[in-house]
Structure formats: structure tokens, C-alpha cells
Image (tube, rainbow, N blue to C red):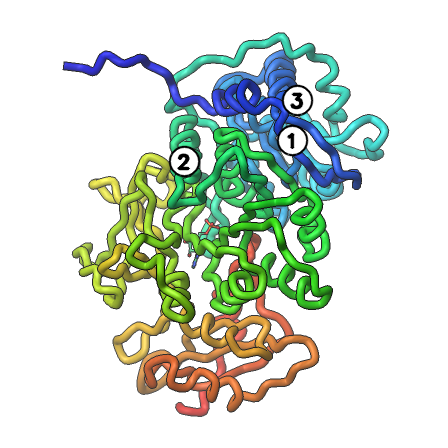
Amino acid sequence: MLGLMQEWPLLCHKLIDNAERQHGLREIVSRSIEGPIVRTTYADIHRRALKVAQRLERDGYRLGDRIATLAWNTARHIEAWYGIMGIGAIYHTLNPRLFPEQIVWIMNHAEDKAIFVDLTFVPLLEKIAGAVKSLKQVIVLTDRAHMPRTTLPNVVAYEDWLNEADGDFAWKVFDEGTAAGMCYTSGTTGDPKGVVYSHRSNVLHAMIAAMPDAMGLSSRDTILPVVPMFHANAWGLGQSAPMVGAKLVMPGCKMDGASIYELLDTEKVTFSAAVPTVWMMLLQYLEETGNKLPYLNRVVIGGSSCPRAIMTKFQQNYDVQVIHAWGMTEMSPLGTLCTLKPEYAALQGEARLDIQQKQGYPPFGVEMKVTDDDNKAQPWDGKTFGRLKVRGPAVARAYYGGAGAEQFDEDGWFDTGDVAHIDAGGYMQITDRAKDVIKSGGEWISTIDLENLAVGHPDVAEAAAIGVQHSKWGERPLLVIVAKPGKEPTKADILDFMDGKVAKWWMPDDVAFVGEIPHTATGKIQKITLRKQFKDYRLPTD
Ligand code: AMP
């Protein structure tokens, strides 16, 4: 017997309908690319998204067409998303930090037909547009007054283009399994792989993210997504915020400490999300200026492991709760969040930080397990490492075009490529990427643990641990350090600081000091490049 409840497809434009109806006057504040702070509301966004949809349809775009965006977080970018999805077309966010050749490759692979582009990226697009065979139209996210002289073909200013529509349009209706968005993972090896979100997965992910023990979002929050919309959907905030009716503050292209602080303060932001490097810049700015964060209540930190020093500063100096989170583009992206179950809620000091250092536990809607190389599930004992595998309604079941099929098994588990352990309380801790882990004498050493420890040293700005060839052990850890400006720590300083805080055989065999550590387009340490750089390094122990 089937249930007798209504069919109500989970479609993304229902999120913006809800925001307009229930929270129409709630503000969306953007630092515009042109400069000034611009204020709109959910009612405005809704009205203009309908115009985007109407205009796209008039220009001939249809269900399933891929429409790229190369843009920062602004209200216009959000409108474009909802307008694109509202006709059943697919928003395809492009990461401008990728190499131009990679962007061309990705656009050709996705066969993007049109692109919404910010003024910042017009020069970049001018260089590559000719190489994208499918591209028919360019819409520059600005008005006529700010439209640059450009060599781009078939180009129009967004506001002019939008003005030709009256917004008298009804969203298209289609199956909730229809593709809504696309984002390519910036794989460190091989070609990028396309993740295709559906309307259903986006709506469910927005609910999962908003739940109290996940991000805990409500209409009383003011949310600043520093994490870009082109980095795994701004961690779902572009959908969760309208779902709950929260005020949104969009940072545009300025992510430095002073600019972020200005928005946090003037807009009374209660909730924000970003990668650790952004928070390091903010904390440094706060230390230099003596400014405080009276309104900010909690921050989600993920994308790479959150150093303990960041947590301590936020919580002790500014009374801001840190929620460490882990996820992936393939997971929409949330996988786990480190909020405290009641049995841990009363913990204080180091014991509390020991839990918060973990990446947390999955909300309802994400299942996880850790397996050995033979796919045998490992015990949840907080120490047995293995490959981290996940499944759920907002987790990819394939890549676009069938690439990377070996990462998906027949039972529906996706192999994340991360190495982790899970403790008896259900909390997961990432210890490495499978390809970065250091294998010393047949045992594994976690590079993340070594890095987290090293950045706790007051003179260290950034640290990366890599395996270097060793004739006896196979590999041994080398710690690569960038010192803070004006500081000159020695190898002995660093090793003395770490001594006793990790197992003896995990201690780095050597420390190398560099001016800079290479990063990927999503801000992660580029271990491949670093390993190449230190390929012929001779450890003093060898
Ligand atoms: P992306 O798809 O670009 O978001 O990258 C996902 C990858 O980032 C994951 O597979 C992890 O390796 C890494 N990652 C994300 N969050 C964390 C975290 N909190 N700690 C450690 N690694 C993380």
C-alpha cells in the first residue's frame, strides 16, 4: 500500500518563493563589485530571479542547459542561480582561481551555453571565451554605466538584459530529480570531475545544513557566507538562508580582515562560514586593531583542518563558538559538523578542544564508515584509520560523463579519498588524504596531526608535512614551515615544541623553512607540488 500524501516535488525555486512570502522584507546586503554596499530584500531577489528565468527562456535556454557563473558572492549571483534553476536549466559555478586552461576544459566538458560574469573576471573571460565552443552569450553582472569596453562577442549588461523582462512568469515544473547545479572538483591529479546536484538533493541538503546540531540556522540569524558560491555551493548557504529566512550579507570580492570585519560589525552578523586562512586574516586584523566581535555568535570552519589556535582565539578572546566541519563538493558539501552532544557539552578547556579538533559527526542524511583496503569496516575506537566512505541523498552517485567510477561501489558508498578514524561517540577525525598519508615502516603517520601541532607554535604561520624517501623506513616525515613575518624560529624550537605531544616515531625527521607553501584553487595545501619540490631531499636521519 502506498501512502496517500501529496506529491510536492522538492524544487529549489520553492525556497525563494518561501523567502519572499514569509520573509519578503528581510535584507540581502552585498558589497558590490562596483564598490558600494547595496541593499535588496528577498522580495526583490524573488522578483528579479523571475525576470532572469523569463529572459533566459526568451533567449532560447531550456531544461537541462548549462549556464555558467564566474562570480563572487553577491545578490545578483543569487538571483542568477534561482532564475537559472527556475526554468530547469543548470547553474554551473566556475572557480576563477583555477588556471585559465582548466576553466576552458571544464566549460567545454559541461558545454556551457551562456555565462554570467562579474566585472572582475571580464579580462579573464576575454582570453578564454573563444576556446569554449558551446558558448553563445555573455551577461556581465553590472549596469550600463559600469559596462567595460570589451572584445567579448554577444555580450550584454545584466541590468539592461533584465529590464527587458517584466517578471510575469511562472516557474517551470519538473521532476525533483532534475539537475539543478554543477560544480567541478579541483582534483590534484587527472582532469577535474563534474558533480551534478539535483533540485531534490539541494533542498534536502539545505534542510540538513540548517538543523540545530548542524549549522543551527534561523530567521533570527544574519549570515555572512565568506566561502564562495563557486566553492561547493557556499556550503549550501545560498539555499539554507532563504529556506529559514535569514538575513544574508554577501562579501563580494573583498575577503581581507578589514573588509570582513567591517561587514561583521556594521551588519551585526551572527553566523559566518569560511576556510581557516580567511579566519587567520581576520584574527590577525583583530589583534592589530583591538577590535571585538560583539554580535558574532558562531563560525563554521572547514575545507581544511581547523588549527587549534584559531579555535582557542575565537572562543577565548572573542566568545565566538567554532563549529569545525568537513565536507566535499561531492557531498553538496556537508559531511560532518563538530557540535557537542550532551555528554560533551560541559567539557571545558583542553578537553573541549580535543573534541572540537575532530571534524564531528554527520547530521541525519549522511551515513559514514571507515574501511581497510579490503573494504572491511573498521571499529569505531577513535584510533583505527581507514578509508572514509559515505552515502546519503545529497551525496554524488556518479560524476558527470562517468569519470571516476571506481570511487562508487555497488552498495552505494562513495569513497571520499580521505583517511579517518571514528570514535565510540561517533565523532570522525580526518587524519589525511589517502594519497598524502606518510607510510613509515608499514605504519601510517597523519600529516594533518603534525601540521595542526606545528601551527600551534607562536612563530609559525603555516606548516605542511610530507613523506620523504628513507632507505630504512620507506618514508619519514619532513615538516615544511612558513614563519610569521619578522620571526625566525629554528628547527630545534619547532621540534622541542612538538616533543611529547605526538608519538615519538611520528616526530618529523627534519624541518625545512620556506617563504611560501603552494595552494590549490580552493585554498588547500598543494602536497603534490611540495613533494616534487622536495623529491631529492636527503633527511639527516638517512
Ligand atoms: P572540496 O571538494 O574542494 O571541498 O575538498 C574536499 C576535501 O577537503 C575533503 O575530501 C578533505 O580532504 C578536505 N577537507 C574539507 N574539510 C576538511 C576539514 N575540516 N579537515 C580536513 N580536511 C578537510
How many marks overall? Answer: 3
290 or 168: nearer the viewer: 290
Give the residue at mark 1.
Answer: 27
Image height of 121 relative to 525, above or below: above
What kind of residue is marked 2? His
Element type where label 3 sits in the image: helix
Residue 436 shows in the view = no
Residue drawn where x is 57% and y is 53% of the image = 521
Q: Quadrant of residue 411?
A: top left
Q: Is residue 450 left or right of residue 38?
A: left
Q: Which residue is mark 2?
A: 205
Which circle's residue, 3 or 1, is located before the other in the chain?
1
Q: Position of residue 291 (x, y in %)?
A: 69, 60
Q: Residues within 10 Å of mark 2 (few under 14, many from 20)?
A: many
Q: Amino acid at mark 3?
A: Asp
Depth check: 51 or 157 in front? 51
Q: Position of residue 278 (x, y in %)?
A: 60, 57
User: Would residue 59 appear left or right of 145 to someone viewing this image?
Assistant: left
Quadrant (top left/top right/bottom left/bottom right) for the C terminus: bottom left
Image height of 113 relative to 395, above or below: above
- Residue depicted at 76% across the width and 26% down the height: 157
The residue wearing badge 3 is 44
Label 1 SS? strand
Task: Compute the Cα span from label 3 to label 1.
Answer: 9 Å
* Residue at mark 2 to residue at mark 3: CA–CA distance: 24 Å
Closest to the camera, between mark 3 and mark 1, is 1
Q: Residue furthest top?
A: 168
Give the crowd class for mark 3: few <14, some 14-19, many >=20 residues within 10 Å: some
- Image height of 486 relative to 282, above or below: below
